Image (spheres, helix red, strand yellow):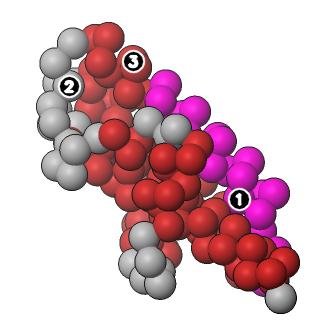
Amino acid sequence: MLLPVLVLVISSSVFVALLLAVSKKILAREFDQPYFQTIARAEHLEFARLPAQPYAIGTPEEYYWLRIAFKCDFHYLDYLMKEAIDAPPRHLVEERFLAAYFRALMVFWILCHHLNLRETRVIAALADVLRYNANVVGEQTERRAVAVRQ
C-alpha cells in the first residue's frame, strides 16, 4: 500500500515541476510591445484592472468575483487565441501547457483560500498567464492587420 502511494506522490511532483518549469519558460517570452493593454481595454477584460501588486482578498464576495473574472477572461482569451492563431504548431503546445498551468493554479488558489494561506502570488501568476495570452492575441491581430494592409 505504501509503494503505490509513494509512486503517485513522486510522479505527481515530477509532473508539477515539469509543468512549472515549462510554463515559466513560456511566460518569459518578450513581445515587441505590450499588446495586452490594448486587448484588455478593447475586450473589457477584468484581470487588467488589478493593481501591479495583487492585494489580499478581504471578503468572500471579492474572492468569488475575482475567481469568476479570471475564469471568464481565460476562456475568452482562449477563444480569441484559437480564432486568431495562424502560427506554427509550437504555439498550440504552448497553449496547452499554459491552460494546464492555469487550471493547476486555480486549484492551488482554491486550496490556499480555504486553508487561509497567502493568495497574492497565485493571483499574480494567474494574471501573468492572462497577460501572456492577451499579448499573443494582440500580436496575432497586429500581424493580420499588417497583412491586410499590404
Residue bearing the label numbered 2: 57
With respect to residue 137, does 91 lie above or below? below
Q: Amino acid at mark 2?
A: Ile
In three-dimensional space, the C-alpha distance between marks 1 and 3, rounded to whole angstroms, equals 25 Å
Is residue 112 shown left or right of residue 36?
left
With respect to residue 20, does 9 lie above or below? above
Task: State the mark number for residue 81.
Answer: 1
In three-dimensional space, the C-alpha distance between marks 3 and 2, rounded to whole angstroms, equals 10 Å
Looking at the rendering, the stretch of residues picked out in magenta corresponds to: 68-88
Other-residue count near label 2 (Cα within 10 Å), few / some / many at <14 / 14–19 / ≥20: some
Tell me which numbered mark, 2 or 1, is placed earlier along the sequence. Answer: 2
Residue positioned 42% across, 28% down in the render: 67
Residue 85 among magenta residues: yes
Residue bearing the label numbered 3: 64
Residue positioned 26% across, 32% down in the render: 112
Is residue 16 visible in this depiction of the protein? Answer: no
Other-residue count near label 3 (Cα within 10 Å), few / some / many at <14 / 14–19 / ≥20: few
Task: State the mark number for residue 60.
Answer: none
Q: Are marks 1 and 3 in contact (CB under 8 Å)?
A: no
In three-dimensional space, the C-alpha distance between marks 2 and 1, rounded to whole angstroms, equals 30 Å
Give the main secondary structure, helix, strand or loop, of the magenta stretch. Answer: helix
- Total number of numbered discs in the rendering: 3
The spot of residue 100 in percent (x, y) is 58, 53
Tell me which numbered mark, 1 or 3, is placed earlier along the sequence. Answer: 3
